[in-house]
Image (spheres, helix red, strand yellow):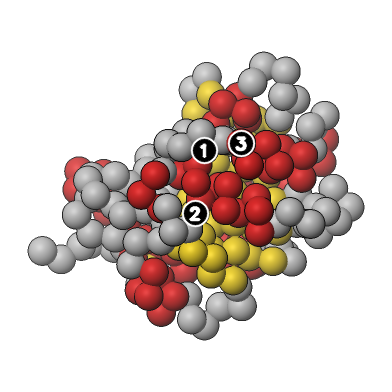
Amino acid sequence: MSALHAAVVLAAGGSRRLGRPKQLLTRDGEALVHRVARLALESGASRVLVIIGARADDMRAALADLPLECVVNPAWSSGMAGSVRVAAEALATHAGATFLLACDQPALEATHLRGLREAAQRADAGSAATRFGDRLGIPALVSPAMLRQARTLPDGDRGLRDVLSATDAGVAACDAPGLEHDIDTPDDVAVAVAKGWLDPVGA
């Protein structure tokens, strides 16, 4: 954990069930993709990569003022695993840990990222992830060895979930109840607006 960490923001999805790009929904006037990337930068990440795919030009425009790298996943429609594979290839020579972050968890706060860093430093695997019931998922801070495992992930939306949740993985678990609420449908948006995690969305 002595090397500087990197961060990956997964922002390539097409938001089919929502009917509009969830990455561009706003909290306090800031697009979610911009907010997550900003939090990643503020965590002290030496590199921040945003994996884009659907509406790539819109994503680049939303991120134009931040010092980060946009990396296109040409097979974005195959699911999150493909974007994690793209990130793993792009960070193949990175010697430190890597945050894996999503755009559809509007309750994310900087305090949770700090908690993941502290937990990863104590964990056998040098990795920490967010607990969701009996499984672990992202946000997560993963070691270089764990990120390398992403290169062989099958297509789909499970990402590194199974790797993180393996009983022998030695991954530290961190709780952040608000992060259980992600954005997939209009009903999810309504709940997040009611909780103050998203700005009201126009028709």
Gap between marks 3 and 2 measured at Cα:
18 Å
Q: Tell me the distance, in whole angstroms, between the alpha carbons under discs 1 and 2.
A: 10 Å
In screen coordinates, is 148 left or right of 21?
Answer: right
Query: For this rendering, which residue is in front, 71 or 127?
Result: 71
Q: In this figure, which residue is indicated by the disc labeled 1?
A: 159
Mark 2: which amino acid? Leu
- Whole-percent x and y of residue 83? 51, 50
Tag in front: 3 or 1 = 3
Q: Secondary structure at mark 2?
A: strand
User: What amino acid does circle 3 point to?
Assistant: Thr
Q: Position of residue 72 (x, y in %)?
A: 49, 64
Query: With respect to residue 167, does 1 lie above or below?
Result: below
Q: CA distance from mark 3 to mark 1?
A: 11 Å
Residue appearing at x 58%, y 47% in the figure: 85
Q: Secondary structure at mark 1?
A: loop
- Between discs 3 and 1, the one toward the N terminus: 3
Of 83 and 126, which appears nearest the observer? Answer: 83
Q: Of the residues under marks 1 and 2, which one precedes in the sequence?
A: 2
